Image (cartoon, grey):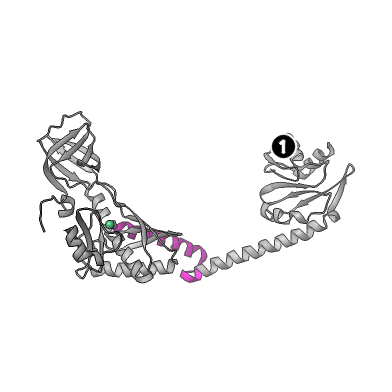
Amino acid sequence: MSQDYSIPTYWESPYTKEFTTKITHVDKNNLQFDKTIFYPGGGGQLSDTGNISYLGSDFPVIQAFKDDSGIWHEVKNHNNTEFKIGDEVTLKLDWNRRYSFMRAHSSQHLLTNVLITMFECETTKANFNEGFVEIEVNKKLKVSKIIQAFKEVNKIINHGDDVLSVIVDQATFAKEYKSKTRGKDPKEDIVRLIQLGEEAYDIVGCGGIHVQNLSEIKGIILESVKGNLIKYYVDEQAFDFANKQRELMIELEEITEKKGEKLTEMVSNKIKDAESLLHGNVSLLKMIFTQIGIWSENVEGKSITLLELPEIDRQIIQSSAKELENDSFLALLGRNDILYILSSKEDLPADEIVKRFSVETGAKGGGSKTFSQVSTKNIDNPLSILKEVIKEF
Ligand SMILES: [Zn+2]
């Protein structure tokens, strides 16, 4: 293979953290160098950051980016230094950040391979951050299956396969690699492939920066699954996250005195209990509503019903409201001291009553002609105040 092109230093030696080179182009605060260790971003991996040393001063590199002319480095020129073409500079990467991206990126190649092998599930998008990866897949997988895939990934990481960077021209690619490369065929003249394992169980065209051995990743831990979006943590961040989750679980286990699957069982039973209690309350209220007249009283010729049911909330009332007798007026003091007004009487519109009640008490509320509510917190005898309000209608 001919070597008449230059291989970026970040591909050739991804572990170079510091590098001395020369300035070749200057455009305001953007600089180009003879060679660079800064990855300009792309393929879901963010650009490197770091700094450069020039004439004894350090200048932060905010980002690196690529255009037709090459890779630019945006420098924070805090003292308006004049950068001169041909001068020497030393480039320094923010290594923790870069190394984190490398581990994240390599872990994604491996996970993608495992998801295909185990479940014929393709990765459609990937984003890398420090110790954190987000991928989108083409089908919804059960969490238990994703966990199965993660287990396999962690096994392979522990096994410690090599990650190889293969750089070939198009002719060699077509002849030797095309048939075993997953994903889209790279269109560039010079093709960069990332290969997992000596036996090459995964090959993909990729311009990103990778670790040399999968064992450097240490492990991955699932953060969340939402539809086709899978998020996970890598290396130390993964262990921190797992320990944090255990902390929450231990607290929950202490409160409930139940562990693991027993805890899940207990919570789902409690939710079922709460649901059946809710259904019970709704049925009970419906029954009351069909015979609301029984509890009615006469306030200056108007037949109204006042109830105090401190366990009843808005959801239950709304589910039962259509059972109310025609031409009725009901004021119900429910949970959290909220007073609900349900009215089908033309001369007693619920919203007007609440408005008048609010003027009288300073309470906050509102609603429609047929259904409105007002908070009666810190108000003594709200129902007798309400009666006085009704007398005015
Ligand atoms: Zn990649």
Residue 221 x/y as whole percent:
35, 62
Looking at the figure, which quarter contains the N terminus? bottom left
Q: 174 or 60: nearer the eye?
A: 174
Amino acid type, label 1? Ser
- Please state if 346 lies on the left or on the right of 136 as rendered: right
Residue 321 x/y as whole percent:
74, 53
Is the shortest distance between ligand 1 and the CB of mark 1 under 8 Å? no
Q: Quadrant of residue 372?
A: top right
Q: Would you say residue 23 sits in the magenta stretch?
A: no
Q: Is residue 320 visible?
A: yes
Q: Is residue 381 visible?
A: no
* Residue farthest along the right direction in this orientation: 301
**How many C-alpha atoms fall within 10 Å of the one at disc 1: few (<14), some, or many (≥20)?**
some
Residue 213 x/y as whole percent:
21, 63
Q: 31 or 138: nearer the eye?
A: 138
Report ligand 1 position as a quadrant: bottom left
Q: 52 or 70: nearer the eye?
A: 70
Looking at the figure, which quarter contains the C terminus? top right
Q: Quadrant of residue 226?
A: bottom left
Q: Is residue 360 above or below residue 276?
A: above
Mark 1 lies on residue: 358
Q: Residue at x 20, y 56 (%)?
A: 191
Q: 198 or 138: nearer the eye?
A: 138
- Please state if 33 lies on the left or on the right of 368 as rendered: left
Residue 266 x/y as whole percent:
54, 68
Q: Would you say residue 247 sits in the magenta stretch?
A: yes
Q: Which residues are magenta?
A: 235-263
Q: Main secondary structure of the magenta part?
A: helix
Q: Residue at x 12, y 42 (%)?
A: 34
Q: Quadrant of residue 194?
A: bottom left
